[in-house]
Image: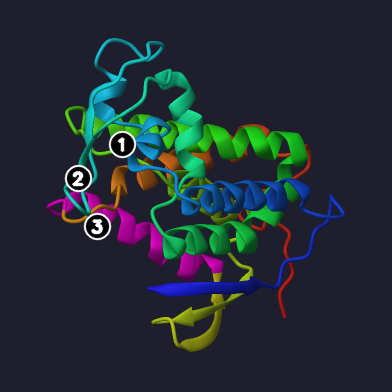
Amino acid sequence: MFVPLRDDNTLSSIHFQYMTVLLIALNVAVFAAEATGMSDAMIASFAVVPKELFAVNIFGAGAVPVEFPDTGVVVQSVAVPERLTLLSYMFFHGDILHLGGNMLFLWVFGDNVEDAVGHLKFLFFYLACGVVAAIVHSLMSANSPAPLIGASGAVAGVIAAYLMLHPRVKIWVLVLKVIPMQISALFALGAWIVWQIVMVVMPQVGPVAWWAHIGGLLAGAVLIILLRRPGIKLFDQGLKTA
């Protein structure tokens, strides 16, 4: 639909978005490790596999066959405690476009959410959104052997929080990936959220975990209310526009 470029939204409580940059660096580092020859079995070990997650209990460690939906390749995962995969899965990505898209959204919108909650609470916020996203995805596809990887659920939480904080702020985007345009966050991010909802009610085609996006959005919307700094208002209350 669109590619975010930047927003006209300065920081007010922090000097720099250290945690946002750290999360981006960790995602890039893990992808670099993937690219240096990490096997599908190893990647699947750190992914959330719904069928494996609910096989015994969330605190167990099991090894079951998992299937990559893009290729149909079936591999045997290494035994990793499932409670850990709820965190680890969000730092692995399928390809450079998967990584780049998620990190671009995190870079553009993460700094202002970090500004609203603080560095350490932003880390908790991001990880919690990712965990909720994985659980919602797994509940909606409990028998799936396909591994879930990617930061999309956590980033969806960031998008929901940004929209609740700054719906009237203008952001620069590439519409249809080629046309530069400055539009309100309400229009751009609202359209993105509507698209996620449309996709979950349509027959599921392809590898995108739409329910993970919904889970992340819901978590982000709730957590920003609970974690924002005292005095931080929602929905740009008090914002003066020309």
Q: Which amino acid lies under the numbered mark 2 shown in the image of this protein?
A: Val
Q: Identify the mark nearer the N-term, 1 or 2.
A: 2
In the picture of the structure, the residue carrying the numbered disc 3 is 198
Looking at the image, can residue 234 be seen?
no
Q: Can you say which quadrant of the picture contains the C terminus? A: bottom right
Q: Nearer the viewer, mark 1 or mark 3?
A: 1
Q: As rendered, which of 83 and 64 lies closer to the eye?
A: 64
Identity of the amino acid at label 1? His
For the point 71% across and 74% down, the residue is 241
Q: Name the residue furthest front.
A: 37
Looking at the image, the residue that sits furthest to the bottom is 179
Whole-percent x, y for residue 82 in the image: 40, 21
| Left or right of 171, for residue 76 | left
Q: Which residues are magenta?
A: 185-204
Q: Residue at x 24, y 57 (%)?
A: 198
Neighbours of disc 3 within 10 Å: few (<14), some (14-19), many (20+): few
Image location (x, y in percent) of residue 23: 64, 47
> Mark 1–mark 2 contact, CB under 8 Å?
no
Displayed quadrant of residue 163: bottom right
Q: Earlier in the sequence, mark 2 or mark 3?
A: 2
Q: Amino acid at mark 3?
A: Val
**Could you tell me which secondary element the residue under label 3 belongs to?**
helix
**Residue corresponding to mark 1:** 137
**Foreground: disc 2 or disc 3:** 2
